[in-house]
Amino acid sequence: MSSDPLFRPSPPPLPRADQREFEELVKKAQAPLSTPASRVLTEEELTLHPDARPPVQPEFEGEQNPVTGETGGPKNEPVHRWTEDGGDWSFKGRVSDF
């Protein structure tokens, strides 16, 4: 056993060609995402998954909420009553009973 703190067990070295390929793959994985994409996504690839929830439609158009008068706020009220008796509330699609 060595007294050097940097001496640690490690995997056996790869053959030179495999090591070079490994290093290139690591460089590609760590490259910034700002590099241009090599291909354009098709319409089919951009569609939602069949199990995905449909996007929530805004309750009003424009920047000002006609009910509250708020400018630049959310387009939907985040908390809603789920049932008529008022016992259940929903927030981001999850229902809670208080």
Image (cartoon, helix red, strand yellow):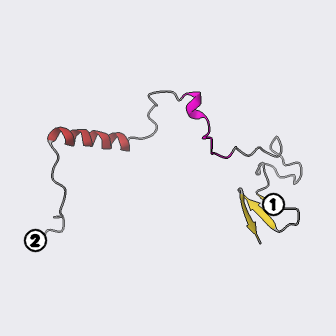
Q: Tell me, for residue 1, which label it has, or none.
A: 2
- The one nearer the camera, 6 or 25, is 25
- The one nearer the camera, 54 or 1, is 54
The image shows residue 69, relative to residue 50, as above or below, that is below
Decide if residue 75 is on the left or right side of residue 43. right
Q: Residue at the spot x=81%, y=41% of the render?
A: 62
- The rendered magenta stretch, by its main secondary structure, is classed as loop
In what element is the residue under mark 1? Answer: loop
Answer yes or no: do the residues labelled 1 and 2 have beta carbons within 8 Å?
no
What segment carries the magenta color? 42-53
In the rendered image, residue 50 lying in the magenta stretch gets the answer yes
Decide if residue 90 is on the left or right side of residue 69. left
**Which residue position is annotated with label 1?**
82
Furthest residue in direction front, as rendered: 50
| Label 1 crowd bin: few (<14), some (14–19), many (20+), radius 10 Å | some
Q: Residue at the spot x=82%, y=46% of the render?
A: 59
Q: Position of residue 12 (x, y in %)?
A: 15, 53
Q: Residue at the spot x=19%, y=59% of the render?
A: 10
Q: Position of residue 41 (x, y in %)?
A: 53, 29
Q: Distance between the residues labelled 1 and 2?
A: 66 Å
| Nearer the camera: disc 1 or disc 2 | 1
- The one nearer the camera, 85 or 7, is 85
In what element is the residue under mark 2? Answer: loop
Q: What amino acid is at disc 1?
A: Trp
Q: Where is residue 79 in the image (x, y as percent from the top left)?
A: 78, 60
Between discs 1 and 2, the one toward the N terminus? 2
Q: In which quarter of the image is the C terminus?
A: bottom right
Decide if residue 36 is on the left or right side of residue 5. right
Q: What amino acid is at disc 2?
A: Met
| Label 2 crowd bin: few (<14), some (14–19), many (20+), radius 10 Å | few
